[in-house]
């Protein structure tokens, strides 16, 4: 990968979000800034052209361009609601294709979203039809994407010791256990990946922890390492409470699969 491609990847990965189900998305107004559009009135025309392209491809517009509201502060101290869109990777690709091609950053966006576009969202029916091992591969891919995005948000919040930061989240979710404690309890070898040795239900709990921590770091504008660590712990603890309220099984009580994903000899379920 050359320096230009790497810049493009960092630029668009930095503004990627992961929702509570582990699905990736971008916000239209953040993408607008990345694409160097200064006025929404001009940019919205690009979005409308992209929505038309989506419709013409027989894809559901609502699946890729979800309209959301956003509150902003105004001069008199009040707030007003503005339009925004929650975009899939495919929606971002279509926006890049319809944007001003004279902008160098648009060319980067076209390359990035074209090369890396992959179907990360599958229907509930498709997911339920997967074997447990395939569900694990699918959820593991989501944790990889989620942790990448979370690390960027943590770095922006001032985190330098990422081991301590991630252990804070595990401690909250696993009732005080660190990553090493989890590995020992599971009987794993030294440096063996704990996420590769989780079932789909345990992975789903961690996806929720990861996505909600990223969202809170950004929403609360966390700007110190100590506060970032506390945020990760608090979110992990809240996810644990939610599982308990729903009558679910605590993550440390869920069974460890007989084989790790590495042992099963696959790289990815979704390309």
Image (tube, rainbow, N blue to C red):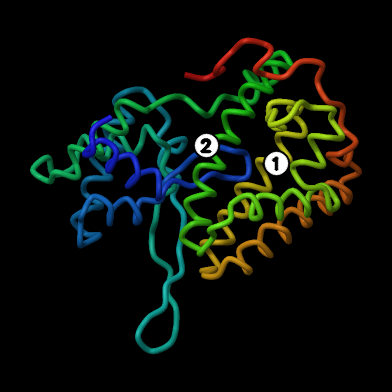
* Residue 169 against residue 89 in the figure, above or below: below
Residue farthest bottom in this picture: 76
Give whichever of discs 1 and 2 has the lower sequence position.
2
* Residue at mark 1: 206
What residue do we see at 62% from left, 39% from top?
21
- Which circle marks residue 145 in the picture? 2
What residue do we see at 38% from left, 27% from top?
117
Residue 56 x, y percent position in the rendering: 29, 26
Number of labels in the image equals 2
| Cβ–Cβ under 8 Å for marks 1 and 2 | no
Residue 50 x, y percent position in the rendering: 27, 38
Q: Nearer the viewer, residue 152 or 36?
A: 152
Residue 231 x, y percent position in the rendering: 66, 63
Q: Nearer the viewer, residue 222 or 73?
A: 222
What residue do we see at 37% from left, 32% from top?
90
Q: Nearer the viewer, residue 244 or 266?
A: 266
Question: Judging from the image, what secondary structure is the residue with disc 1 in?
Answer: helix
Describe residue 21's horizontal placement relative to residue 170 as left or right.
left
Describe residue 38's horizontal placement relative to residue 163 as left or right.
left
Question: Judging from the image, what secondary structure is the residue with disc 2 in?
Answer: helix
Residue farthest front in this picture: 190
* Residue 199 against residue 202 in the figure, above or below: above
At label 1, counting other C-alpha atoms closer than 10 Å, the crowd grade (few under 14, some 14-19, many 20 or more) is many
What separation in Å lies between label 1 and label 2 (alpha carbons)?
12 Å
* Residue 189 against residue 82 in the figure, above or below: above
Residue 242 x, y percent position in the rendering: 81, 51
The image quarter containing residue 91 is top left
At label 2, counting other C-alpha atoms closer than 10 Å, the crowd grade (few under 14, some 14-19, many 20 or more) is many
The image quarter containing residue 89 is top left
């Amino acid at each position: 990968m050359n320096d230009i491609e790497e810049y493009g990847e960092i630029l668009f990965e930095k503004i990627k979000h992961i929702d509570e189900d582990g699905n990736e998305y971008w916000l239209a107004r953040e993408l607008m800034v990345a694409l160097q559009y200064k006025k929404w009135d001009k940019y919205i025309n690009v979005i409308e052209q992209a929505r038309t392209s989506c419709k013409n491809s027989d894809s559901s517009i609502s699946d890729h361009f979800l309209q959301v509201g956003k509150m902003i502060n105004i001069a008199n101290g009040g707030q007003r609601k503005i339009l925004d869109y929650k975009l899939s990777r495919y929606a971002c690709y279509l926006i890049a294709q319809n944007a001003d091609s004279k902008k160098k950053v648009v060319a980067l966006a076209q390359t990035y979203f074209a090369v890396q576009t992959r179907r990360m969202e599958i229907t509930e029916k498709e997911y339920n039809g997967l074997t447990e091992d395939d569900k694990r591969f699918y959820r593991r891919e989501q944790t990889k994407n989620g942790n990448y995005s979370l690390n960027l948000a943590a770095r922006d919040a001032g985190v330098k010791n990422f081991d301590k930061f991630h252990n804070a989240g595990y401690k909250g979710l696993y009732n005080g256990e660190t990553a090493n404690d989890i590995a020992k309890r599971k009987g794993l070898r030294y440096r063996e990946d704990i996420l590769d040795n989780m079932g789909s239900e345990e992975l789903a709990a961690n996806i929720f922890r990861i996505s909600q921590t990223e969202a809170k770091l950004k929403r609360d504008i966390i700007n110190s390492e100590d506060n970032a660590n506390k945020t990760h712990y608090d979110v992990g603890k809240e996810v644990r409470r939610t599982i308990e309220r729903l009558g679910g099984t605590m993550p440390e009580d869920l069974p460890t699969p007989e084989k790790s994903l590495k042992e099963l000899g696959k790289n990815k379920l979704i390309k």
